[in-house]
Image (spheres, rainbow, N blue to C red):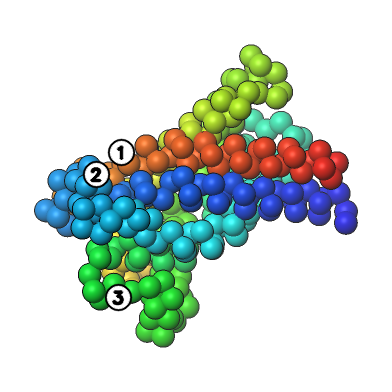
Amino acid sequence: MSQRSASTANELIAGSVGGAAQVLVGQPLDTIKTRAQIASKEMFKGPMDILVRTIRTEGFFALYKGMASPLIGIAGVNSLLFASYATSKRIISPFPQLTLPQIALAGAMAGAANAILASPVEMFKVRMQGQYGAATDKRLRDVAREMWQDWGFRRGIMRGYWVTVAREIPAYAGFYSAFEFSKRQFQSRYGEHVPIWALLTSGATGGIAYWLCCYPLDVVKSRIQLRPTPPTSRPWAYINAELRSIVAGSGFSGLFRGLSPSLLRSIPAAASTFAAFELTRDFLRELTGV
């Protein structure tokens, strides 16, 4: 195996480990976030009301509803993300130390590539989280079969793809640039190998920047992916129409419903993702020498 192939394999394995850590740590708050985004304005009073009522009516493990889809797919999603990011950095510059604008560009490129897998994974997750414990609730395999049989690949499985692309580009530009900025601040004080707590802090900083850069588009994505029928207009048109619909129904604040659990989730989830990824990659580098 060539040195470049071994390096890419290390990135893929480390990304898988980081992705699994993200799902396990962040799923309960992600469920609260998604339900805040897709529920009618009158259904819940706020994130805490969603938490209490979900546990009371559906049980604690309802907070992990929809976890199967990202847990199955996150290894591929994060592997693609981290590998795309590493490749994007090599395309942008032959030098290992990129400027922050170059880091942002590499993150945007990686985000665009990542949407190919992130879109179907999140579509299935959203449709599972949008079920509230009724007798008619469906299992993941039933949702997948229904979407395929009724709408096919493009309008069913890949529903919401273009809004996912629109979300991922600014999200990962912010994600990686914030992570690298924070990490470099710590490196200036502690040297190349920063303490684990500094790595966790940098990961959390990246996670917060992710949501702040893209949140209204995430609300649009969740609503479009949950609808019983796919959009019929061009992507820019249905995204714009959905943004207008949200503002008309809930005001400008409707574009940020569920942001607080997203920010809370981003701290442990992003921190665990980056910590797991970086520690696994460092271990594999020592093991393989690349």
The answer to whether the residues at label 2 and label 1 have Cβ atoms under 8 Å apart is yes
Q: Is residue 216 left or right of residue 156?
A: left
Residue at x 74% of width, y 34% of height: 96
C-alpha gap between disc 2 and disc 3 = 27 Å
Please tell me whether mark 2 or mark 3 is closer to you in this view.
Answer: 2
- Residue type at mark 1 is Ser
| Residue under numbered circle 2 | 47
Circle 1 crowding by C-alpha within 10 Å: few under 14, some 14–19, many from 20: some
Residue placed furthest toward the right: 2
| Residue under numbered circle 1 | 260
Percent position (x, y) of residue 92? Answer: 69, 43
- Residue type at mark 3 is Thr
- Residue type at mark 2 is Pro
Of labels 2 and 3, earlier in sequence is: 2
Which part of the image, by quadrant, shows the C terminus?
Answer: top right
Of labels 1 and 3, earlier in sequence is: 3
C-alpha gap between disc 2 and disc 1 = 8 Å
Quarter of the rendering containing residue 279: top right
Residue 119 sits above or below residue 233 on the image:
above
Residue at x 25% of width, y 76% of height: 136
Secondary-structure class at tag 1: helix
Residue 69 sits above or below residue 181 on the image:
below
Secondary-structure class at tag 2: helix
| Residue under numbered circle 3 | 229
Q: Nearer the viewer, residue 235 or 43?
A: 43
Residue placed furthest toward the left: 42
